[in-house]
Image: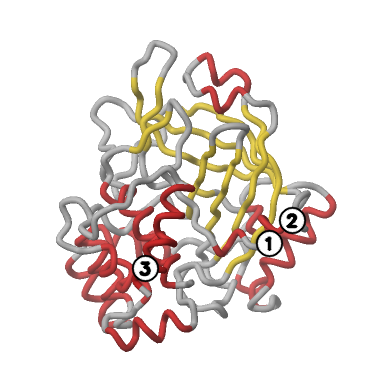
């Protein structure tokens, strides 16, 4: 069993250009295994083994589709990223709900989009959410949040009373209405990345996807008329007629902006660069790589030349945690 586990891990690391990481997550006292257990709600051996049998994972309810990315040709005037010099790049997308429940209702407000943009020689992955507000700035708080929310209302209230970042997140989500479609939702990369300029300077930025058709929210009356599983059919039906399209921007940090803490929002006045447009049209949905995209991982630090991860501990914990979750699902 252990040999099989590390054969899988080695394969993933080769595919994602990563070395095998230690079980210790940087400066955190929490291991990769503990972080994944907190997310999955599997705090002991019995629940962990039960979770493996049902292939327990976060964002369990979701589906894959496909399209392409069209880079903005003017971007190379501001950033030196050869990857974006291509004219059209294949995209594999997974849209999902949060949590481990395969039958979660689409009537909740959370919307998530993960993308794989596969270029000629390099790749770029995204892991995004429709909330620009994140609930933890370090791995200890991330672990605590995951454990407490699974305790129900009492745990949530503890977070509100004791963790300001969690309270800010809950306050934001409370007023966030459900969108009518995955296509009518914005998506945010809450973590920061470092981008190289033509002068070999480095600037920090965060990803933002804005829907070209605008944000369309549902009223409670409209929501009551819908089934709990309306989002998948809505998007796949929509893209038969025309693609779902997002403008992709990089929101740039200024000198004193905090780039290693995803709970810190930058002012809306910050400069934004148009990177290009994502078109989801289902053009490769019959291909096996699209149909099975949910079985793999979306690695946000699989980056082309000219883009590097920041020192954000949440960002740098994502890939080893995703790999651990992947291994458990085998």
Relative depth, front residue between 162 and 298: 298
In the image, what residue occupies the spot 49% across and 67% down?
59
Residue 125 in the image: x percent, y percent?
51, 45
Residue denoted by label 2: 287
Label located before the other in sequence (1 or 3): 3
Relative depth, front residue between 153 and 7: 7
In the image, what residue occupies the spot 60% across and 60% down?
179
Alpha-carbon distance for marks 2 and 1? 6 Å
Dividing the picture into quarters, in which one does residue 305 lie?
A: top left
Residues at circles 2 and 1 in contact by the CB criterion of under 8 Å: yes
Label at residue 99 = none
Secondary element at tag 1: helix
Query: Which residue is situated farthest in the bottom direction here?
Result: 46
Residue 147 in the image: x percent, y percent?
27, 75
Q: Dot 2: few (<14), some (14–19), or many (≥20) neighbours within 10 Å?
A: few
Q: Dot 3: few (<14), some (14–19), or many (≥20) neighbours within 10 Å?
A: few
Residue denoted by label 3: 3
Query: Which residue is situated farthest in the front direction here?
Result: 3
Name the quarter where the N terminus is drawn. Answer: bottom left
Image position of 78 with respect to 316: above or below: above
Label at residue 291 = 1
Any part of residue 212 in sight = no
């Amino acid at each position: 069993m252990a040999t099989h586990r590390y054969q899988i891990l080695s394969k993933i690391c080769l595919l994602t250009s990563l070395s095998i990481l230690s079980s210790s997550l940087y400066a955190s006292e929490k291991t990769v295994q503990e972080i994944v257990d907190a997310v999955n709600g599997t705090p002991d051996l019995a629940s962990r083994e039960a979770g493996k049998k049902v292939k327990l994972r976060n964002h369990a309810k979701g589906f894959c589709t496909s399209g392409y990315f069209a880079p903005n040709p003017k971007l190379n005037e501001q950033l030196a990223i050869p990857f974006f010099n291509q004219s059209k790049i294949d995209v594999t997308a997974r849209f999902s709900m949060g949590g481990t429940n395969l039958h979660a209702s689409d009537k909740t407000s959370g919307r998530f989009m993960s993308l794989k943009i596969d270029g000629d020689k390099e790749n770029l992955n995204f892991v995004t959410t429709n909330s620009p507000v994140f609930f933890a700035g370090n791995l200890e708080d991330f672990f605590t949040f995951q454990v407490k929310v699974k305790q129900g209302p009492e745990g949530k209230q503890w977070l509100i009373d004791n963790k300001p970042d969690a309270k800010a997140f809950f306050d934001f989500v409370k007023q966030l209405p459900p969108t009518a479609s995955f296509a009518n939702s914005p998506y945010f990369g809450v973590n920061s990345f470092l981008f190289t300029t033509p002068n070999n300077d480095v600037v920090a930025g965060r990803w933002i996807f804005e829907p070209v058709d605008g944000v369309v929210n549902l009223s409670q009356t409209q929501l009551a008329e819908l089934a709990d599983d309306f989002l998948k059919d809505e998007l796949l039906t929509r893209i038969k007629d025309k693609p779902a399209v997002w403008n992709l921007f990089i929101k740039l940090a200024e000198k004193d902006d905090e780039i290693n803490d995803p709970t810190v929002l930058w002012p809306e006045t910050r400069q934004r660069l148009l990177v290009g447009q994502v078109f989801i049209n289902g053009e490769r949905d019959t291909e096996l790589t699209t149909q099975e995209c949910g079985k793999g991982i979306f690695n946000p630090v699989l980056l082309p030349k000219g883009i590097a991860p920041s020192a954000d501990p949440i960002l740098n914990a994502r890939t080893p945690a995703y790999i651990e979750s992947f291994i458990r699902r085998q």
